Amino acid sequence: MMKNSKIDEMTLIQKCAQEIASSTAAIIGHNLIITDVDGKIIGASQSERIGQLHEASLEVVRTGTASETTREQARQFRGTLPGVTFPIQNLNGRTVGTMALTGVPDEVRPFGLIVKKQIEILLRERELYVYSSSRESILQDLIHDLETFVPGVGNETMLQSRAIELGYDPSLFYIPIVVDLYQFGRYALEIRRECRDGEVEMRI
């Protein structure tokens, strides 16, 4: 499970790395790179840097803390320019890559904190989407297998084990319920009038 989870995380960050690097650099006016946990650049506003090693990222991945690189220090690291490097963390707080901004550390540090948070928010949203989609598919398969289960033919122990993994307690009785929200559109509009923006979805 851990191996598959790591592959999923890396796939997610690789898919959005170049998009984030290009769009963010255009807004803040500083070059930006994103690396994987091995320090390999997987997204860069300067596309020629993709695939190179950003050596300063290795220590950031190891410690999980941000670092600054002066012009003098940059000469000692492969593929590294002066600037700041921040860890990128997933939903579980595990470092899955880094983000680095090029420039004088004191000047780019405030941008770095903002960009780091934005990357993490985007990554976590995509993680949640993939997780919910995967769980939905697994639940659908389980329901189908329950519907078609034939006592004495199907493997009841395996079916029960799969259900337990999804949080079901075999000692309890479950009743399926279908909820039909009458005039949901009108109800949603009323909630939007009564609540502030941040409370609307929770109330609904």
Image: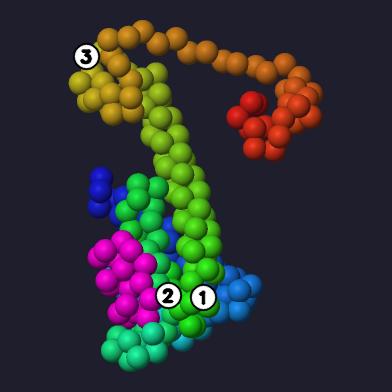
For marks 1 and 2, the one nearer the N-term is 2
- Inter-mark Cα distance, 3 to 2: 63 Å
Count of picture labels: 3
**Residue 10 place in picture, x, y as percent:** 36, 60
Asked if labels 2 and 3 touch by Cβ distance under 8 angstroms, the answer is no
Q: Which sits in the foreground, 41 or 146?
A: 41
Looking at the picture, which amino acid does disc 1 mark?
A: Val
The answer to whether 148 is drawn above or below residue 22 in the figure is: above
Structural crowding at the residue carrying mark 3, measured as other residues with C-alpha within 10 Å and reported as few (<14), some (14–19) or many (≥20): few
Q: Residue at x 65, y 37 (%)?
A: 198
Q: Circle 2 is placed at which residue position?
A: 84
Dot label at residue 108: 1
Report the mark closest to the observer, 1 or 3.
1
Q: Residue at x 49, y 58 (%)?
A: 117
Asked if labels 2 and 1 touch by Cβ distance under 8 angstroms, the answer is yes
Q: State yes or no: residue 187 in magenta.
A: no
Picture quadrant of residue 86: bottom left
Looking at the picture, which amino acid does disc 2 mark?
A: Val
**What colouring method underlies this structural image?**
rainbow
**Residue 167 place in picture, x, y as percent:** 33, 24
Identify the secondary structure beneath mark 3.
Answer: loop
- Inter-mark Cα distance, 1 to 3: 67 Å
Picture quadrant of residue 55: bottom left
- Inter-mark Cα distance, 1 to 2: 7 Å
Residue segment shown in magenta: 51-69
The answer to whether 144 is drawn above or below residue 138 in the figure is: above
Dot label at residue 128: none
Identify the secondary structure beneath mark 1.
Answer: helix
Q: State yes or no: residue 54 in magenta.
A: yes
Q: Circle 3 is placed at which residue position?
A: 152
Looking at the picture, which amino acid does disc 3 mark?
A: Gly
